[in-house]
Amino acid sequence: MKNLINKIRVSNAGLEAVILRVPIGLILAAHGSQKLFAWFGGYGLDGTGQWMASVGLAPGVVMALLAGCAEFFGGVALILGLLTRPAAMINALTMLVALFWVHWGHGFFLDTHGVEYALALLSATTALVFIGGGPYSLDALIETKLEANDE
């Protein structure tokens, strides 16, 4: 079990991790806040839930809550580099659902609600699953503190 926890936390990535984590985390947190809190022109849980139900993701409010929490809290976790791999994995799965359930069949480009944007976020979050939080993350800070305690 300790080995699994170490694999989740420890990362050999460098500066590239923070360069990827922070903007992707901001994008995801902003989109999640639209779904959860109706911030930044979003529709909140009720409006997003109605839309999700209309595209076949039912129950809509539950799906809006799940997607909103994954994006908002997962995005904040990515910004901080806290539990980076699990946060990235949850968001990669969320983007996979968005890509195939919502955007598939609308072409490629963003202007037609195609797969372009969801594919970019899926790629970035999948990369973060593999590279982890890097040295400038709370994951690294926690690992340093745990190592100091083990000595």
Image (cartoon, rainbow, N blue to C red):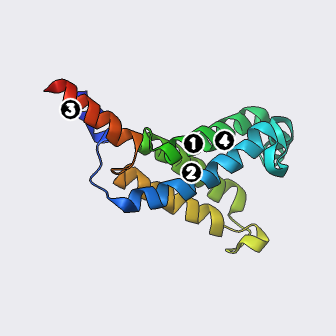
Locate residue 149, reporting x and y percent.
21, 24
Say if mark 2 contacts mark 1, CB within 8 Å: yes
Dot 2 and dot 3 residues touching (CB under 8 Å): no
- For the residues bearing labels 1 and 3, Cβ distance under 8 angstroms: no
Front-lying residue, 136 or 29: 136
Which quarter shows the C terminus?
top left
Question: Residue under circle 1?
Answer: 76
Q: Earlier in the sequence, mark 2 or mark 1?
A: 2
Q: Are marks 4 and 3 in contact (CB under 8 Å)?
A: no
From mark 2 to mark 1, how far is it between C-alphas? 6 Å
Choose mark 4 or mark 1, whichever is in front: 1
The residue carrying mark 4 is 67
Q: Residue at x 64, y 65 (%)?
A: 117
Report the residue marked by disc 3: 147
Mark sitting earlier along the chain (1/3): 1
Look at discs 4 and 2 and give the one toward the viewer. 2
> Which residue sits at x=58%, y=64%?
119
Residue type at mark 3 is Glu
Q: Position of residue 98 (x, y in %)?
A: 65, 54
Name the residue at 85% across, 36% down. Answer: 46
**Displayed quadrant of residue 144:** top left
Q: From where the camera sits, is residue 48 visible?
A: yes
Is residue 57 among what the camera can see?
A: no
**Looking at the picture, which amino acid does disc 1 mark?**
Val
Q: Is residue 23 left or right of residue 142?
A: right
Distance between mark 2 and mark 3 Cα atoms: 27 Å
**Height in image: 105 above or below 3?**
below
Q: Give the class, few, some or many, for how many residues have Cα within 10 Å of label 1's Cα (few <14, many ≥20).
A: many
Circle 2 residue: 25
